[in-house]
Amino acid sequence: MKKTTKRVLSVLLTAVLLLGMLPAVSLASGELTVVLSMEGLTLGQGLYVEPKAYTLGRINELLAGAGYGEYSETTLTAAAATVAMLLDNVSDFEYGGDDPEKFYLRSVT
């Protein structure tokens, strides 16, 4: 293979890999939709929570019950969406850090 062909191929493969890492967000319904899941595949444990689509409205419903404010398309964070998914699927979880918008998960049961 020529050197130029290898470079083009490596650039294309890099682009595909980077696009695959983007979060799955859909605006087809007119409302922001985020797909979330929880997995332990790197530990050989499979999926804890199957991938599920959450609309912005559903995220706000779940978070309102836990005392969080309402989010818009511009203010929703990955942390807030993750907390909504955990509230919907997990019996108990703890997070650390001073700000519930910027946290790390300590435990999930």
Image (cartoon, helix red, strand yellow):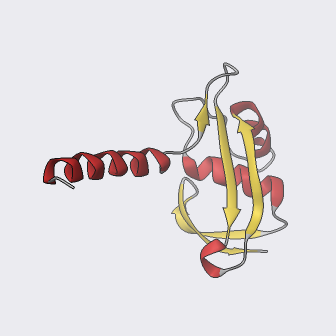
For this orientation, the residue located farthest to the left is: 3
The residue positioned 16% from the left and 52% from the top of the image is 2
Q: In the depicted view, which residue is nearer to us: 25 or 83?
A: 25
Q: Position of residue 95 (x, y in %)?
A: 63, 68
Q: Position of residue 42 (x, y in %)?
A: 59, 76
Q: How many marks?
A: 0
Seen in the image, is 13 located left or right of residue 79? Answer: left
Residue at the extreme right of the image, as rendered: 91
* Near-viewer residue (54 or 83): 54
Q: Position of residue 90 (x, y in %)?
A: 81, 63
Residue name at image x 49 percent, y 48 percent:
20
For the residue pair 85 and 7, the one nearer the viewer reads as 7
**Which of the 4 quarters of the picture holds residue 50?**
bottom right
Where the C terminus falls, by quadrant? Answer: bottom right
Instruction: Identify the residue shown where x is 21% and y is 48%.
Output: 5
Question: Which residue appears farthest toward the top when viewing the image?
Answer: 30
In the rendered image, the vertical position of residue 25 relative to residue 48, given as above or below: above
Q: Residue reaching furthest front?
A: 1
Image quarter hosting the N terminus? bottom left
Residue 66 coordinates in the image, percent (x, y): 77, 50
User: Can you say whether 30 is above or below 45 in the image?
Assistant: above
Does residue 44 appear left or right of residue 76 in this picture?
Answer: right
